[in-house]
Amino acid sequence: MIMKLTFKNVTMVLNLVTPGAKGEAGKDGARGADGTIGADGADGKSTYDIWLAAGNTGTETDFLASITSAYQIWLDTGHTGTKADFIVSLKGDTGPQGIPGIAGTNGIDGVNGEQGAKGDTGEQGIQGLPGAGVAAGGTTGQALIKTNNTDFATEWESIYTATQIDTKFQEVAALPATPDANTFYFITE
């Protein structure tokens, strides 16, 4: 049905259509099964085995005797100082930010502590500026109506009761030449 309404010299044409019902959301799919755990990898070679594979010969004792300490290499490259000085020199520049780790689960809430003693009363604050708030005035049966798009631009207007609204509607074949600004006209086609 098409309906035309005119109120305060404004005509609206309404096409009254009822929308269809909203369908239900689909259910979540089932979770897939976990994959199987892979087999253990083969044991890696020891440092001694790698030393032998590099063409060296000897026992593990020979291998250990062949190792030069990092501290000795540091001294051999022109540095001087104690082993403590060497340890301090090992600190490098700060590296880049690592990727965030997986969030942990929340811990259990602890027990509430006892209530503390009441504090002293604070000093009086300074008086604030008056707020925009609701416009003063109005009487019973009135409501604030926006007068334009500016914030807080309102005025008090009377609210029509159901009986008053019924008397404001008129069914007409065509709009009058000079419509009453306080009457709703509707034309059925």
Image (cartoon, rainbow, N blue to C red):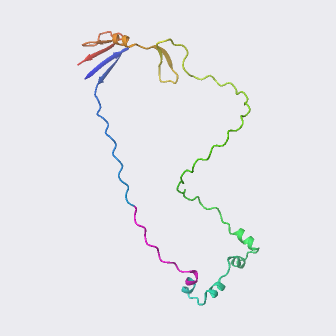
Residue at point 57%, 59% (across, down): 98
Q: Considering only vertical position in the picture, is 37 above or below 122?
A: below
Residue at point 56%, 22% (across, down): 133
> Residue 116's spot in the image, x, y percent?
70, 38
Q: Considering only vertical position in the picture, is 145 above or below 111?
A: above
Horizontally, residue 40 falls left or right of residue 95, namely: left
Residue at point 43%, 67% (across, down): 37
Tell me the quarter of the picture where residue 166 sits: top left
Quadrant (top left/top right/bottom left/bottom right) for the C terminus: top left
> Residue 8's spot in the image, x, y percent?
38, 14
As for residue 138 lying within the magenta part, the answer is no
Judged from this view, the residue extending furthest toward the bottom is 57
As for residue 47 lying within the magenta part, the answer is yes
Judged from this view, the residue extending furthest toward the right is 81
Does residue 137 appear in this view? yes
Tell me the quarter of the picture where residue 81 sits: bottom right
137 or 154, which lies in front? 137
| Prevailing secondary structure of the magenta residues | loop
16 or 122, which lies in front? 122
Tell me the quarter of the picture where residue 48 sits: bottom right
Count of numbered tags: 0
> Residue 23's spot in the image, x, y percent?
31, 39
Residue at point 64%, 61% (across, down): 94
> Residue 80's spot in the image, x, y percent?
76, 75
Residue span colored magenta: 34-49
Horizontally, residue 170 falls left or right of residue 150, namely: left
